[in-house]
């Protein structure tokens, strides 16, 4: 077995962007909002020379048009309240490390990397929740992200392929337009899915809600996606996707005064609030720009600050392979702010200095040897380089958000009829207080605690 590793850069988390700098998603794509959407709105788009590509009864739509005056013409009659050119947001690169090990079945009762290498599930006390009978069974978590490798043997059992969708524009049959395709060997959506629901199957890693169902909803490809794709993905997940929880490990930070920012932000708020109205909790990453959002009032963080959702900051140990257990240590890159953060979760870090090698055992035998700093990150499923998939360490609020989404799934299993508000309260009231007493800028209401969450 080859236990070598390779360090590389991969697209993974929230980007600091200006809408004007990255430009429109397509010269003719627009995000439109109305009180509700129906024949009058379709007619307004057609009269302005456009074509409706996607619409929802809640009043959100995406239209395409070639004319430079389309938006002004579409808004002129009053049937459509607001709109803006759609925008593609490039996600920021973060450091990752591939573990060059193919998935294999272990004869041991626990998975190969869980007991010794996976600190994140243990840091949120997931094993105690499992022992109490809560594994996420029957709960559906939509992963709005990039492509998910649904054939991964350490994920396949928990993927609802029938409900999987892609809202990324592209030619029929192309990788770009396929829910189960992306670029490179990391595949961000695959990593996120494993954190939530990699099954306890004797293979590789274990998710925090190992019997939850993943609904892959692709809104990004090769690390970028548009507002239109994300909004359509939310609306689908909350209705036909039959999600109980939505995880969005994606986003951007951009100036409020940028042209179109208010309109796009408003549309995203409406989509998140629509999901909440359907009983679906939206969990988002807080972003990786190391920004104090309380003192940057001109910036919008989406979807972390969108609607009635939760935003998750990140923590991670410094020197786990050397014996450190400071799992609630705030990550070096995470955004913070009382106006932003609801909860903190295990996202990992890579701040340990040097490239000294460390070795940790596998279960039931063997070892993993990589740079010591890698063990401070979060190990999960990835596309890998073979048909059997692979595993990758990554760090970011992209990794902490799915940990919280998974704990929400455990609560939802115990209390299936729980409202979004009550679910949020249970997550926050059961969290372990960290930082300053009460709600603080770094941890929000605290560090998510699976055992306490299902005990309440």
Image (cartoon, rainbow, N blue to C red):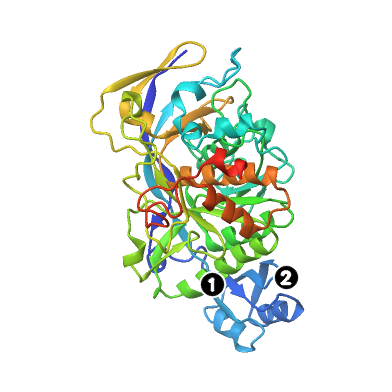
Q: Residues within 10 Å of mark 2 (few under 14, many from 20)?
A: few
Q: Nearer the viewer, residue 29 or 115?
A: 115
Q: Nearer the viewer, residue 283 or 27?
A: 283
Q: CA distance from mark 1 to mark 2?
A: 16 Å
Q: Is residue 93 left or right of residue 242?
A: left
Asked if residue 100 can be seen in this view, the reply is no
**On screen, 410 above or below 101?**
below
Q: Quadrant of the C terminus?
A: top right
Residue 115 tag number: none
Residue 422 found in image quarter: bottom right
**On screen, 61 above or below 220?**
below
Tag 1 secondary structure: helix
**In the image, residue 306 lies at what x, y percent?**
52, 64
Residue 353 found in image quarter: top left
**In the image, residue 172 lies at what x, y percent?**
67, 49
Q: In this figure, what is the number of numbered marks? A: 2
Q: Nearer the viewer, residue 274 or 81?
A: 274
Residue drawn at x 46%, y 72% is 261
Residue drawn at x 43%, y 75% is 259
Residue drawn at x 40%, y 55% is 15
Tag 2 secondary structure: loop
Tell me, yes or no, whether the two marked residues, 1 and 2, touch with CB atoms within 8 Å.
Answer: no
Residue 266 tag number: 1
Q: List the residue tagged with mark 2.
A: 57
Q: Residue furthest left?
A: 354
Q: Nearer the viewer, residue 45 or 348?
A: 348
**In the image, residue 224 lies at what x, y percent?**
48, 52
Q: Earlier in the sequence, mark 1 or mark 2?
A: 2
**On screen, 241 above or below 385?**
below
């Amino acid at each position: 077995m080859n236990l070598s590793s390779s360090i590389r850069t991969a697209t993974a988390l929230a980007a600091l962007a200006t809408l004007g700098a990255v430009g429109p998603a397509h010269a003719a794509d627009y995000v439109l909002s109305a009180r509700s959407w129906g024949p009058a709105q379709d007619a307004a788009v057609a009269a302005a020379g456009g074509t409706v590509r996607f619409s929802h009864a809640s009043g959100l739509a995406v239209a395409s048009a070639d004319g430079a005056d389309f938006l002004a013409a579409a808004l002129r009659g009053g049937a459509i309240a607001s709109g803006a050119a759609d925008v593609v947001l490039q996600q920021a690169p973060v450091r990752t490390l591939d573990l060059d090990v193919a998935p294999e079945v272990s004869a041991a009762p626990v998975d190969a990397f869980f007991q010794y290498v996976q600190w994140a599930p243990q840091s949120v006390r997931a094993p105690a929740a499992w022992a109490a009978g809560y594994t996420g069974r029957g709960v559906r978590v939509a992963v709005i992200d990039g492509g998910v490798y649904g054939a991964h043997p350490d994920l396949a059992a928990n993927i609802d392929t029938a409900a999987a969708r892609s809202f990324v524009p592209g030619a029929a049959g192309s990788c770009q337009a396929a829910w189960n395709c992306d670029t490179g060997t990391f595949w961000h959506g695959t990593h996120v899915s494993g954190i939530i629901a990699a099954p306890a199957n004797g293979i590789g890693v274990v998710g925090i809600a190992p019997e939850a169902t993943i609904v892959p909803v692709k809104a990004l490809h090769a690390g970028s996606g548009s507002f239109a794709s994300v909004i359509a993905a939310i609306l689908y997940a909350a209705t036909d996707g039959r999600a109980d929880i939505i995880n969005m490990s994606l986003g951007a930070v951009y100036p409020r005064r940028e042209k179109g920012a208010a309109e796009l932000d408003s549309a995203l708020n409406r989509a998140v609030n629509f999901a909440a109205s359907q009983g679906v909790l939206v969990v988002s990453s807080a972003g990786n720009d190391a920004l104090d959002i309380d003192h940057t009032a001109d910036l919008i963080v989406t979807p972390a600050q969108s609607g009635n959702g939760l935003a998750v900051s990140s923590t991670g140990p410094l020197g786990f392979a050397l014996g450190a257990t400071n799992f609630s240590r705030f990550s070096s890159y995470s955004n913070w702010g009382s106006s932003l953060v609801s909860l903190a979760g295990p996202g990992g870090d890579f701040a340990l200095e040097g490239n000294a090698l460390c070795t940790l055992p596998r279960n039931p035998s063997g070892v993993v040897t990589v740079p010591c700093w890698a063990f401070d990150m979060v190990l999960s499923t990835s596309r890998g380089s073979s048909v059997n998939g692979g595993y990758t360490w990554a760090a970011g609020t992209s990794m902490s958000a799915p940990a919280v989404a998974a704990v929400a799934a455990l609560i939802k299993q115990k209390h299936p009829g729980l409202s979004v508000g009550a679910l949020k309260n249970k997550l926050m009231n059961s969290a372990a207080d960290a930082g300053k007493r009460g709600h603080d800028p770094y941890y929000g209401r605290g560090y998510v605690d699976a055992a306490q969450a299902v005990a309440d």
